[in-house]
């Protein structure tokens, strides 16, 4: 059993920054790739970023490339999402997730089996 707890969300003006954290329980955290997804009101959950077990491979959605950075600290069982140059389209609930079975990152939510409760990010214009 794995539990994921996100934190760091909030209200920020356009152009501002936030850093999200996702703390994981369990000893197997470092064996799996992790991902961040988001869901805006009335929209489907969408991929944001993912990272391999070692942190050496990262994937980003085109809409966040160059502005958001995913990282992880396996000693702390934590994955991060540094968010810079935020705009109103980044508003949504952000979820972290653990890959179902692989050390390599994936882009679809169906490949992840454990999810956090989400943290709200609101970007005002």
Image (cartoon, helix red, strand yellow):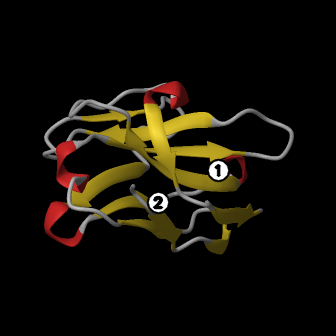
Tell me the SS state at disc 2: loop
Q: Quadrant of residue 82?
A: bottom left
Vertical position of residue 25 compared to residue 90: above or below: below
Quadrant where the N terminus sits is bottom left
The earlier-in-sequence mark between 1 and 2 is 2
Q: Which residue is mark 2?
A: 84
Could you say where residue 21 lies in the image, as x and y percent from the top left? Answer: 42, 68
Residue sitting nearer the eye, 20 or 95: 95
At label 2, counting other C-alpha atoms closer than 10 Å, the crowd grade (few under 14, some 14-19, many 20 or more) is: some
- Residue 87 visible (yes or no): no
Residue closest to the far front = 1
Q: Residue at x 36, y 39 (%)?
A: 50
Q: Closer to the camera: disc 1 or disc 2?
A: 1
Tell me the SS state at disc 1: helix
Q: Which residue is mark 1?
A: 90
Could you say where residue 87 lies in the image, as x and y percent from the top left? Answer: 65, 53
Q: Residue at x 14, y 68 (%)?
A: 75
The numbered dot on residue 2 is none
Would residue 25 appear left or right of 89 to someone viewing this image?
A: left
Vertical position of residue 101 compared to residue 82: above or below: above
Could you say where residue 123 lies in the image, as x and y percent from the top left? Answer: 70, 63
Q: Residue at x 21, y 34 (%)?
A: 103
Q: Residue at x 68, y 64 (%)?
A: 120
Query: How many numbered marks have been drawn onto this rendered protein structure?
Result: 2
Residue sitting nearer the eye, 34 or 64: 34
């Amino acid at each position: 059993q794995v539990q994921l707890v996100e934190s760091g969300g909030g209200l920020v003006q356009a152009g501002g920054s936030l850093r999200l954290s996702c703390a994981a329980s369990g000893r197997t955290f470092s064996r799996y790739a992790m991902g961040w997804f988001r869901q805006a009101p009335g929209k489907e959950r969408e991929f944001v970023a993912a990272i391999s077990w070692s942190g050496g491979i990262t994937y980003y959605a085109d809409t966040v490339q160059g502005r958001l950075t995913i990282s992880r600290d396996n000693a702390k069982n934590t994955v991060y999402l540094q968010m810079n140059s935020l705009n109103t389209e980044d508003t949504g609930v952000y979820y972290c997730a653990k890959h179902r079975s692989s050390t390599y990152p994936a882009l679809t939510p169906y490949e992840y089996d454990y999810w956090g409760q989400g943290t709200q990010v609101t970007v005002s214009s």
